[in-house]
Amino acid sequence: MYKHILFATDLTEDTEYLVSKVRSIRSLTNATLSLIHVVEPLPGYSYAYLGIEDIEGQLINEARQSIEKLGSELKVDKAAQFVEVGPTKTKILKIAEDISADLIMCGSHGRHGLSLLLGSTANAILHGAKCDVLTVRLPEE
């Protein structure tokens, strides 16, 4: 059974739904749990504009606070809580490999039309991972 689960979260309102699934899998496997959230760099964002707040820095700080709160709720050690900046798929797969995760859990929306053609983070993780991936179908709104 699984020994180390990496829960990749976008920290949206869907997180609570996913947390219940993560708890269930974790209780069945008694696996170690790590958390990751990736902040995508803002396109065209430059620090060169004086007087503009550090929006990216604020996003990172907010993500760290949210991951810390989630980590506390799920009893995840601080050293196993990751907030990364960069391409989401790449960062999740790198951390999964670095920590020897044998399962990545993430949420997935049912996509149609243009969204389906462009792909999704869950799909990218699924096709790039060297371990099992469990995508949890998020409830329709």
Image: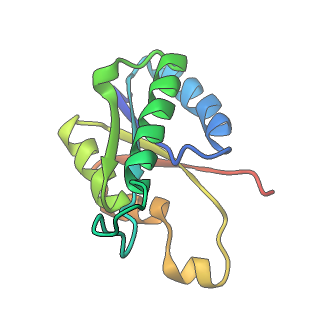
Q: Quadrant of the N terminus?
A: top left
Q: On the rendered structure, is 63 left or right of 136?
A: left
Q: Which residue, as the protein is rendered here, is positioned at the far right? A: 141
The picture places residue 123, in percent across and down from the top left corner, at 46, 65
Q: Which residue, as the protein is rendered here, is positioned at the far front? A: 51
Residue 22, by quadrant, is: top right
Q: On the rendered structure, is 68 left or right of 83?
A: right
Q: Residue at position x 28%, y 43% from top?
A: 96
The picture places residue 91, in percent across and down from the top left corner, at 29, 53
Q: Which residue, as the protein is rendered here, is positioned at the far left? A: 98
The picture places residue 43, in percent across and down from the top left corner, at 38, 73
Residue 35, by quadrant, is: top left
The picture places residue 21, in percent across and down from the top left corner, at 61, 33
Q: Quadrant of the C terminus?
A: bottom right
Q: Residue at position x 31%, y 38% from top?
A: 102
Q: Residue at position x 47%, y 31% from top?
A: 65
Q: As displayed, is residue 123 above or below residue 38?
A: below
Residue 104, by quadrant, is: top left
Q: As displayed, is residue 79 above or below residue 90?
A: above
- Which residue occupies the foreground of this view, 61 or 23? 61
Q: On the rendered structure, is 110 left or right of 39?
A: right
